[in-house]
Image (cartoon, rainbow, N blue to C red):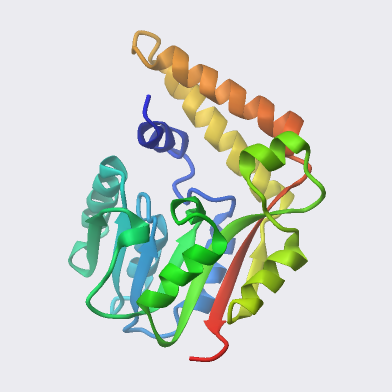
Amino acid sequence: MDRQTRSLLAHADHPIAAPLDDFSVDRLLARAVVRGDAHILDLGCGEGAWLLRVLRRHPGVTAEGVDVSAGALERARHRSEEADVAERLTLHRTEAASFTAEHPFDVVLSVGATHAFGGLLPTLDAARKQLAPGGTVLVGDAYWEREPSPWARETLGEYEDLAGTVEKVTADGWTPVYAHLSTRHELDDYEWNWTGSLSRWALDHPEHPDSAEALRAATQHRDEWLHDYRESFGFVCLLLRRTTE
């Protein structure tokens, strides 16, 4: 099973694709989108859950989403038609790190997609190139709440702690104007949804050639989470402005 298909199945019940609940998503978007005619870009949009939420609530907003997954983009397109916002949403199937637009955006999002750019600072560099003067970036990435196990650090990444993450961002020329730290409930709910959705699909489709592999992947992910990184892994969403234009 390819990574994109597995991700679609694992996020079936949690299309935000990051450890945040509905209230947290709404609060972050309310802080980020302050103009009723804003142009918004999501780099690594997946199924477009963030963009669709904005478009439903702001009839003057236009949005563009970028992702490599044809399946995710098709779901985004279908749901935008159901919500009657398709004419205000443009979707691009391409690598987010290489995407370029002909016009700047008031808000650039990239939540849980920094791996596509090679880390947090490269993600912010890509966002900066798309950002209008005075615009806002909403980025979500992992950090270490406490010292991780050697396995977690080697496998999940060389993240900083929260203070180090913020210092790295500010040294790169950004000023945080708001932030959200995912709660233990949000983190656990995300993992239970990820492993549970994939497991349920496997159990419901025992004759599918990918069923056994999907169940093994869900089991392995759950075991690694519970034994290796649950107590150390954190997730922060930062609302950022350029310190100097």
Residue at the right extreme, as displayed: 147
Q: Quadrant of the N terminus?
A: top left
Horizontal arrangement in the rendering, residue 61 relative to residue 148 (left or right): left
Instruction: Say which quarter of the image contains residue 60.
Output: bottom left
Residue at the left extreme, as displayed: 87
Judge whether residue 39 can be spotted in this image: yes
Horizontal and vertical percent position of residue 178: 63, 76
The image shows residue 41, relative to residue 243, as above or below, that is above
Q: Which residue is drawn at 39% across and 55% down?
A: 44
Q: Residue at x 46, y 71 (%)?
A: 125
**198 or 236: which is nearer to us?**
236
Horizontal and vertical percent position of residue 204: 41, 16
Q: Which residue is drawn at 54% across and 82% down?
A: 241
The image shows residue 185, relative to residue 149, as above or below, that is below
Horizontal and vertical percent position of residue 127: 43, 71
Horizontal and vertical percent position of residue 220: 60, 23
Total number of numbered labels? 0
The image shows residue 72, relative to residue 119, as above or below, that is above
Judge whether residue 29 can be spotted in this image: no
Q: Which residue is drawn at 58% across and 54% down?
A: 21
